[in-house]
Each structure stands twice: as C-alpha cells, then as structure tokens.
Amino acid sequence: MLAFMIRRIIQSIIVMFVVALISFLLFRFVGDPVNQMVGIETTPEQREALRDKLGLNDPVIMQFFGFIKGAAQFDFGVSYQFKRPVAQMIAERAPATLELSLMSAIFALLVGIPMGVYTGLKRNSILSKFFLTVSLVGISLPTFLIGILLIYIFAVQLQVLPSFGRGEVVDIGFWSTGLLTVSGLKALILPSITLGLFQMTLIMRLVRAEMLEVMRTDYIKFARARGLSRTAINFGHALKNTLVPVITITGLQLGSVIAFAIITETVFSWPGMGLLFLHSVQNVDIPIMAAYLMLIGFLFVMINLIVDLLYVAVDPRIRVSGVSQ
Amino acid sequence: MSEPLLKIKDLIVEFPTRRALLRAVDKVSFEIAKGEVLGVVGESGAGKSLTGAAIIGLLEPPGRIAGGEIYFDGQRIDNLADEQMRHLRGKRIAMIFQDPLTSLNPLYRVGEQLIETIQTHLPMNKKQARKRAIELLDEVGIPAPETRIDGYPHQFSGGMRQRVVIALVLAGEPDLIIADEPTTALDVSIQAQIISVLKRLCSERGTAIMLITHDMGVIAEIADRMAVMYSGQIVEIGKTYDLIKNPKHPYTKGLMGSIPSMSGEVKRLVQIPGSMPRLNDIPSGCSFHPRCSKVFEPCYSKRSPQIKVGQSDVACWLYSEEDKK
C-alpha cells in the first residue's frame, strides 16, 4: 500500500512538471505583454527597460527555471495588469469557484445516482422514460444556454432566484464562504445546476447502464435465490458493484467542473477563478494564466490520486494487484 | 407414500417475443419426495434450467409461467406474490448456479455474504451467525475456516468457491436444493469432490435435490430417480438404475447409447441424427419424431401421454399397446 502511494506521488510530480513546462511554453506565444501594459507614446527604450524588469530578456531556460522555483513556493509573480501578487489574487477567487464546483458535484451525485438506480431497476416505467428524455436535454444542450434558460425562468420570469453574483459572503479566515447566508445559498442554486446538469445526466446514464449490467450477473441471481431482501440486493450488492466506474467518472468530471466553471462563471458573473482567467486572457496577463493552468493541473492530479485510493477502498481485487506489482 | 415435497403439474413456461410465443417448457409434471435426489438430464435448451428457475420463482422476464401448478410441501407456490416467495427462497428452496466463479459477489468477504444470508433466515445475532458461518465452511470442507471466512471470493479457487456456494445454500437449512449444473464449470477432479460434499450434507439433513446436469456419471452416482427432458417435455422419468440399464424411450436409448462404456467392449457409439428443434419450429405430434428411428403413424399427429412401463413413465406411442393390455 505504501509503495503504491509513493509510486503514485512520484508519477504526480512528473505530471506537474510537464504541466509547468506546457503552461510556460504556451504563454510565451500568446502575445507581447508589454504592448498591453504601456501606452502608445512609450518609447522603444522604455519598453526595453520594462522587458528587462519583467525578466523577459533572460534566456528561456533561466526563465523556466525561475518559473518552476516560484511555482514550487506558490509564487507566480505579479500580475502585469493589476500589479498584485498572482497567488494572492487566485486565493481570493478560489473559494467562489471551489464552492460552486463542489455544490454542483454534490448535486450531480445526489440526484444522478438515485435516478440511475431507479431507471436501471424500473426500465419500463413511465418515470424512467421521462428521466431519460430529460437527461438527453442535459447532455445535448450547451452549458451557457442552460444557464441563460435558467436565468430567464427563475430570475426574470419567476423572480425567485438571483441571476448574478454570490450574494452575501462570510469570511472565515482566508476563506470567504457563501454557504452560511441565505442569499449566498440562493445565489448558488442556479449556477450549481447549470454547471452540474451535464455531470448529473452523465452519472445517471452511467449508473443506469452499470445497474442493468450488474442485475444480469450470476451473483445477483444467486443473492435473490438466497432470499435476501430487495433493498439488500439493490443497494448493497448491486449498487456497490456499479461504483468503480462511477468514481472514475465523478473524479474526472470534478476536475473538468472546476476547469469549465469558466463558462458558468461568465454567464452568472460569478467572481471566481474562471472569470479572472478570462479577463487575463483578454489582457495577455501571462502570470495569471500560467498560475491558473498550474492550479487546474494540480487539482486534476490530486483528484486522480484520490480516485485511485478510493478504488482500492471499494474493490478488494485491486488491492491485491496494486501491492504485488 | 406420504405427500411429496415438490409436486409439479403440467408446468408451462413461455417467452412472448415480438414474432411469436415461444413455449420453452411444455406441460412438465413430476414429483420429488422428501430427501430424494432427482436428476434431470437433457440437451442444452431442453428446458431443464427454466423448470428449475420456475420452481424457485426466478424466471427472467419476459419468461413466465403460463400454465400448470407447482406445490411445495402441500402449498401452491407458483402464484405467490414476490415478497412471500422471497421468504421461501433460501429458507425452504435454495438454488445453486452453474458457475461458482461468478455466483459470489466479488466485493464482499465470504463471511459477510454468509452472515447476511444466515441472518436473513435465522434469528441470530452477528456473533452467532459468524460462528454458524464458520461451522458451515468447515462442513463443506474448507480448511482453516476461521481465517478463510475473512477472505474475498477471488482468493478462493473454483472448487473452493463452489464449496462456499454450497455453504451459502445450506445456510437457510432448505428442504429442497435445485442444483443447476453445479459441476459443469469445474475441473473433472474437483467435480467428484463437490458432488460427494453435496450428497453427504444433503443425506445428513434429509434435503431433497433436483440435480440438473448433462453429466450422466454424476446422475448415476447420486440420483435416486432421473428425468429425461427433450424440447421442453419430460420424455421419460423413473428409477435411475432402470433408465440407465433399460431405457424405454427412443431418445433415452440414444442418449444412453452415446455414452462410452468402460467395460472394455469396443462398439461404435450410437448417434442421434439431427439436432433438437428450435423453439419457434417445434414439429407437430411427438417433437422427437423427425429424429426417431422407430417413428410410425401416430407420432406425426399427436403427442403421446405419459405411459407407465414397468417402474418408469414414458411418453412414447410405442408403449401404448402395452398400456391397454
């Protein structure tokens, strides 16, 4: 088990190094930041001085080395546009995005799994067919359209939920949370549904497919032949066997939820990292873009690590092969 | 003789499909006495397994019992509600499936599955159930049951898993065990062990067995009586010894003739020409007539009733003259 963990952590470090290399190289080519920072009347000499000051004239390898060194200490330099430390700016914005992503993931799991179990067990009921039809909408409609539709219905027509912002937030240390106020919670509902709808339908369809598969297996037949109760079979024996793929997908999707929160944050003017990233792209604010990419990479790696450990907890067969390798 | 444990009268199992109604089991009648071992043989698709599944109420939809009656211990069970049937399953009637490798849930310890089954049927607390589980594992011949009880199914070999399955089946102390090809998936050397364990435990407890197999050797070894099924019907049923030494129905004769003899005389094995009819193309009259060497007038138009010949019941027109005498 320990060897397994160490191996996985070493793999994660290699992945992060590659992510750093890509984010570093990529943003060398997105445009000249100096153009964005200065006015038209700046002389070439002044521009050159600024380039020097930003370290843009150093050899590329030295720049990369500096970038890695900084990143390891959570120091991503200073934003070209706002002249503030990037790490601090991201730390301010991260709670908004993480809370939104978490809520939408919880929404997707809490609604998706029971719906999947239900549609898997009662394949022919009318409600199942209704769920499947609705899920088709969730899969095929683009996120921004769902967001706008929800705003139109619940904010414009019914006027029960806010259409933008986080509502009131409470600061707990460095973390500003919207989970403790009524307006904060209300503000979370629409963006969470928008962001989580695709995941929810995905999980529902996955659980359904797995349930159909598992219910056909011999061990379920044998469990029924032993006279076990329906609940024990459906939610104990069957559901547990569907969990490995569900954990994989949920883990991968949680990463994308955080990464693709950009769109939802734009639609709902949600003051999170995605919105910050979008602004920094428009202004060629390289330190912010690089830091954002690194952070998303880091989250993906961490989530994958947790997913791998969860497999081991759920499926004993992986436990053995994991150790013996 | 006292009331039989299981009495089946004119059982019909049908599969409605889009094209036609397929009749997989066609008016099957037989009885099993308390503690008796009835062997059921026949080719694949003869309806053996479906008969077993119909008795325990585990027909896979769209398959359904379309006619006939099943009595267990004097009580009619084919029309019981699922919840009432569940109380019989495992407790009074148990079933062993073909493949021990897939009959156990891979994610639960062997002990958990045993304890769950014991507690479903017997008023025991967890500690008592665990003690009982260890006893059961010991009885089916699993070495070191105190430690093996905490193993997962994948840590057991095929033969050991089938022993675990037998322990699970015995957990509710049933009166009848339907064993659907319990040794087909096992090595030949293990088959004999499993059969002898099953036979020993059932004769100790006075448990009746309906043994579905196409292995004549197994039947000859433990069955008191045997039934031969062909195309959804019982063509001959009687004492095992009689059927093997003195088969009456042309199909039974063919079946017995196709077994290599160990006594040394080298003869050509008898082949039955052709193959069993498909369910959507069952011939008129006696369904065996296109393959029968003794076919004559009445076989084409009408199916023969069960006719008593010596100790056996045979469904063949050849014996109808004897019957009238």
Image (tube, coloured by chain):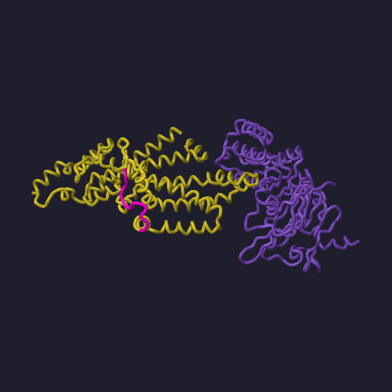
Chain colours: A yellow, B purple
Front-lying residue, B208 or A230: A230
Q: Residue furthest right?
A: B325
Residue B125 is situated, as x and y percent measured from the top left of the image, at 63, 33
| Residue B169 quadrant | top right
Position of residue B122 measured from the top left corner of the image (x, y, whole percent): 67, 38
- Point 27% across, 35% down: residue: A73
Does the magenta-highlighted stretch encompass residue B241?
no
Instruction: Residue at 33% x, 45% y: name it.
Output: A97
Magenta-tinted stretch? A157-168
**Residue B270 at least partly seen:** no
Q: Is residue B219 visible?
A: yes
Task: Identify the residue shown where x is 62% and y is 44%.
Answer: A228
Quadrant of the rendered image containing residue B272: bottom right
In the rendered structure, does residue A163 fall within the stretch colored magenta? yes
Which one is nearer the viewer's eye here, A68 or B267? A68
Compared with B58, A17 (above or below) is above
* Magenta stretch prevailing secondary structure: loop
Across and down, in percent, residue B231 comes to 71, 60
Q: Is residue A231 left or right of residue A68?
A: right
